[in-house]
Every structure is written in structure tokens, then in C-alpha cells.
Image (spheres, rainbow, N blue to C red):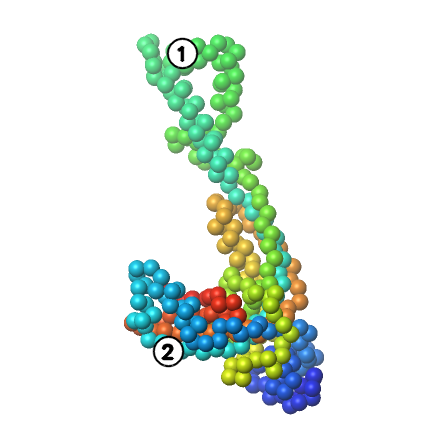
Amino acid sequence: MKCPNCGAPISPKFGEMVITCEYCGSGVVLGNQGWTNIQKHTMLSLKIASVDQVNGIITPLMDKGLLHRHLQQDSTQEEMNLSYVPYWVVPVSARTSVVAANVAAQVGQTATTAALMGIILGGMGGGGGRGGFGGGGRRRAFSGLGDGASALFLSAFASVPIRAFGMGMGMGYGGGMRKAEQMDASYNFPVVALKALMEYQPRDYQFDLDGRALFDMTKLPRNVKVLNGDISEDVAKSQAKTLVDQLQSEKAHAKYHMIQQLTTESDVGDAELLHAPIWFAKYDHKGKKIVLVIDANSGRVIDSIGL
């Protein structure tokens, strides 16, 4: 097989679908038409290049809080390596419609009902005569309001569903008890293009794409390995949509209480292949595995497992 760009021989390993030509640096993908050039192949520059720089990021993170004091010092480092990892960056525009219970309205209505019940029950329980729930007590509750005001008061009370004191709990909420909200968001969602690294798939992370450049093998450090991928663009686009739907749902549940209905519609665009420099730091702490995945372009933590 030959590179479709420069004609040099390419030797993909079994299962690989996304490779980088070792001669010209072109991204090549296996699709229905065989091996073809990737339309957009970009890279991020390496800024966190030394182990000391990485430790400067990891140490405060691992030793954060009293329970984690000296955690890095007391752990055995099993691995610390840097690679250029392929990600499919998939543009996704998500529109999430949320119908949630209007908690403020429910609380206000319950308070109003409780106040009205207090007035009525107070009137029913007072004075002589037969008292209690008898006719005399009920009349006394409104006797001081006058005929017109009494009728208006009773009408207002009748229009409020009784939810206090254990009454009316089975009744449904009206339209005022629900509110509809729209959550719109746009993502450049990264999907790791290598099955062996799927356990480190970002959940809610986006790379700093403003500083990316077209992929150029000559600008990469010679001692950093460039990984190939085995996940196709179509699979990545489907996965990005699923993960964005999950992320939108998580954000909605964090923002709203008692969600009654939630739907998300997403538009997925064409993906680009991005090679990003990634540090993988693995530790053992008394038999517990700790893994930190660091973006070596921005210095931010992509994922932490075991902390």
C-alpha cells in the first residue's frame, strides 16, 4: 500500500484505520474508497515538554486537601509518558428542551394554602356553641368580613388546590406548576481515535483549538511518539452525538429540579483529525491505581482516575 499523497509505502497495523505517513506526515484514513487523505488534519504544539513541568501540575492536584496530603510522595510512579494522541474533533450543536417543576410556584402555593387553612381552622375551632367543625364555627370564620368579602374569600380559597395537612396530595399540578426552558450549546467535542485509550475518553473537555496548526511531521519533537488510530470518523461522529446528549442531560439535571421531560436535538458536522500532545501519569497508592491525563498544550487536566 502507498500513501495517497506522496506515494511512499505505508504499513498500517491490523485494525488501524487512521494513520500518519512517516514520510510526508499526511493523515490517511481507511474508508469505503480505500485509503484516502484526511481532509483536515491538525495538531497542537507541545508546551509542557518536561517531566518537571508535569510534576508541577500533578503535585498540587494529588496533594489537595488533608486526606490527600503527601499522596504523590507516598505513591509509586508506574508510568510517565508523552505521546501525540489522535482525536476526532466533532462540531456538535445541541438544543435541549427541558420541562421542569416550578419549585418556586409550588412553594408559594403551598404557603398560601397553609395560611388560608390556618385562618379557617382557627375560626372553626373558636368560640362557644357547637364549635369544632359545626356550622356555628364555620360561620364565625367569615362573619367579620361582610357578605361580599366573605364570598370573595371563599371563592379564592376554592380555586387553590389543597396540598397542606396531607389533603389533595394525589392531585396533578397545573400549567403554572411547570416551566419550559431551552438549553443551547455548541461543542468541538473530542473523541479519542484509539480504542486502547477509550477509558480516557474526555467527558466534558475541549482543546484550545485557536492555536492549532496544520499537521506537520517536521515540527514534532523527534522523541515523541505519534499514535495512529483505529476508530473511523463515522463512528466518532455517532459517539460524539451520544456523549453530548449525555452531557446536556447532566447539565440540565444539575440546573433544574424535578425534570418531567427532556429532549435533545443535535446537528453534527464534519470532523477533523487532531493530534494533541498528552501526558499519561500512572501511580500506585497502596494497591489503588491513580491515572492523570494532562493536555501538554494547555497544561490542563483532561481526566483523573482514582483521585
Left or right of residue 229, residue 300 in this image: left
Of residues 37 and 264, which is closer to you in this image? 37
Find residue 237 and report its image quarter. Answer: bottom right
Q: Which of marks 1 and 2 is nearer the N terminus?
A: 2
Q: In this view, does 91 lie to the left or right of 285?
A: right
Mark number for residue 180? none
- Quarter occupied by the N terminus: bottom right
User: Counting other residues with Cα less than 10 Å from the Cα at mark 1, is it few (<14), some (14-19), or many (20 or more)?
Assistant: some
Q: What element carries label 1?
A: helix
User: Is the residue under label 2 in contact with that under label 1 (CB below 8 Å)?
Assistant: no
Residue at image point 54% right, 55% down: 248
Answer few, some or many: residues within 10 Å of disc 2's Cα (few below 14, many 20 plus, some between 14 and 19): few
- Residue receiving disc 2: 78
Give the answer, above or below, for where 212 lies relative to 99: below
Please provide percent x and percent y for residue 175. 56, 36
Q: Residue flagged by tag 2: what amino acid is it?
A: Glu
Dot in front, 1 or 2: 2
Any part of residue 301 in sight: yes
Please name whichever residue, 122 or 237, is drawn nearer the observer in this view of the structure. Answer: 237
The answer, for residue 235, to whether it is visible in the render is no
Disc 1 designates what residue?
A: 140
Tell me residue 22's x, y (percent): 61, 86
Type of amino acid under label 1:
Arg
